[in-house]
Image (cartoon, helix red, strand yellow):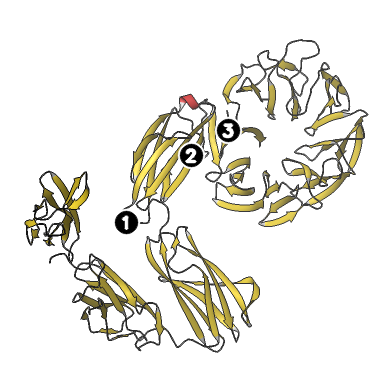
Amino acid sequence: MPLPQAFVVRAKNNSDAGVAVVSGVEVTFSVLNGGGTLSADRVVTDENGLARTTFTPGSAVGDQYVQAAIGESVVVFVTPVRAAGPQAFLISRGDMQQAAPGTPVAISPSVLVRDAWDRPLAGAEVSFSVLSGGGTVGPAVVRTNEGGVAAVDSWVLGSARGLNTLRAADTAGHEVLFTALAAPAPSPDISLFVRSPVANTTVDQDTLEVTVDVFSRFQLRRIQATFGSRTFPVDLSAFNFPCGSRWCTRYSASLPLDGEPAGRKLLTLSARDEFGGENSELIVFHVDRPPALKVQGLSHWGVVQSETVTIDVTCVDDAPAGCASLELRARGNSTPLASGSNRLTYVLDARPYDGGLLEVQLTGTDALGRRRDMPLVLPVELAPGLTKVASAPEGAFALDFGGSRVAYKSPVVDVVGLLDVATSVDARLGSGYLAWVTPFGAIWQDRGSICTEFRHSGYIRFPNGGVGVHVNGPYAIYQESATPFNGALKLYDTLSGRTDHVADSSEYADVSASGDVVYERYGSVYRYRAGSSTLLKDARQWPLTDGINVAVAPRGSGTARGLSIILADGSEVPLAEPREGLRPRTDYQVANGWTAFRVPFVSNGNLGIWVRSPSGDISLVSLPDQYAWLEALAPDGRVVYASAGRRYLAAAGSVPVDVGAEHGIVKVREDRLLLLLGRDVLEMQ
């Protein structure tokens, strides 16, 4: 078929007198590619200097070129040639209808067919067939009219209640789907307005959030959402609101999309009142989630204890083609270390990161450009003698451990939880950033100084706040105040649930695993035991107790500070000469009759970490080191201390052992020395 417009050129002559058209000059037209033909290939310009020819494109698809030349002067015409036949196949009318079962829809379904130049295509063959729901359609084959429209005479829905689907297809492989709901006639007493999802939008999350406003003249019996073969109840939200001259009620639901492939989806929302009246709304939306990344053998904030790390990651997309690209980068580096599509494997040397963090970034992208970024942060600890005993959920940070339970904090928000690694029971406790494992559950504290106990699947909130919390075994101490030092000091027994009033206030306090409490109040140190307080020392001191001995050191700005212990019989034994900056836990600790301290012994000027045994023997357990500081003292006298960025395990009569870098938190639980690093709990042996 020739093009509707001819190719036209004009010959002009440029001279000093100006520009003038030139007649009587021969113009040569030639087809450069595509196999097309010309109505004339040599044409003489007319009195207006014009020469024209008509071009019939060849069958080749693509740009076809025709050249016009006068001597060395050349112009080129470009004609884009597209494939013949239908190029656009669209729904014209009749989608998303509702009719009673066994009856025809009100609007007959029709499609619009256009050619490569976006013109209505007449005479194209379109076939219609019922895909689901039963019913009939006729006629089965229709040809498009002059407007490019093909319409059936009728579509009768199936006899059963539910969704019906009709397929329309052309000979070029294009197809569209019509959807109708077979349901009783809509009740005039019920109206629905769907707020989300918005029709024809794309959902890129793992859940579909549904919100619908409903007006009903009578009491509603149910509201439900149907998605595919699954039906979900839609719950009443918290408020009513005016809609026009009436009052509406808002309902909402979250529908899972796990495993749902990408593509066009249909949601049906229906409401039924107590008299059987019903109304429904159909919403078409599309699902296309970003790719999902899964790493084998490694987890975010999981400790690496081997010299090499194999990063094996799989990229999964909800589209049939899978992921378009998958890349691994070092954190903060734009150059990929490795790339692939649906899977990649890469081996990294972990030794340069020992004692620190190995950080990489994984990025998966689908065919539409949607991407998923996954940071992978791996603490690296290659020291021997550390055995992993438990892990918090992936990406969380371990806060405490006891028995088989890990208390942890979410890395994104202040939410704490308790995971039993023996049973895999994971209890999300609530808002908080600190947590301690107890025999029956856990105690946690939020940033508003509110403490709560999780106990036998129930929750108990500490009255009047809970600052200065310290937990040891089954006992906890805290102050009933929003600010430190102002509230009453309380002792809480998690075994019995009993709370004792220890003192009206305190400036520093400690509790032992046996329930003894020591505290400093108004410049004096007291011990609380069995319901009563006893004065131990009339001086401002930092007290610590293990239920046997009490270690005390003077406190106060500019005061030289010596360390001593008060034994079970009440006698006081000096341990260290006066020294500035002495603090409990980092400078001295007590456990099961043992005392560890970091100041010089009174009869020996060597600096370092010392221990006093229950029998009174005193030993230097570290190398001479004025910068060493205490981290933990076990009930058997073993000490963990840190120095110059490294951590050491020491005991009287043995050489200190390097147990890794100074990262994470060291705790003593059930006579075990534990390192909490990232999401993992490791035991020092």
Q: Earlier in the sequence, mark 3 or mark 1?
A: 1
Q: Is residue 654 placed above or below 98 in the rendered structure?
A: above
Label 1 close to label 2 by CB (< 8 Å): no
Residue at figure coordinates x 8%, y 59% from the top left: 37
SS for callout 2: strand
Residue 278: x and y, percent? 50, 84
Query: Disc 3 marks which residue?
Result: 683
SS for callout 1: loop
Q: Amino acid at mark 3?
A: Glu
Residue 636 appearing in the image: no
Query: Disc 2 marks which residue?
Result: 376
Residue at figure coordinates x 89%, y 28% from the top left: 540
Residue 53: x and y, percent? 11, 60
Q: Earlier in the sequence, mark 1 or mark 2?
A: 1
Q: Residues within 10 Å of mark 3 (few under 14, many from 20)?
A: some
Query: Disc 1 marks which residue?
Result: 320
Q: Residues within 10 Å of mark 1 (few under 14, many from 20)?
A: few
* Quarter of the rendering containing residue 510: top right
Horizontal arrangement in the rendering, residue 664 relative to residue 613 (left or right): left
Residue 633: x and y, percent? 69, 28
* Foreground tag (3 vs 2): 2
Residue 311 appearing in the image: yes
Q: Residues within 10 Å of mark 2 (few under 14, many from 20)?
A: many
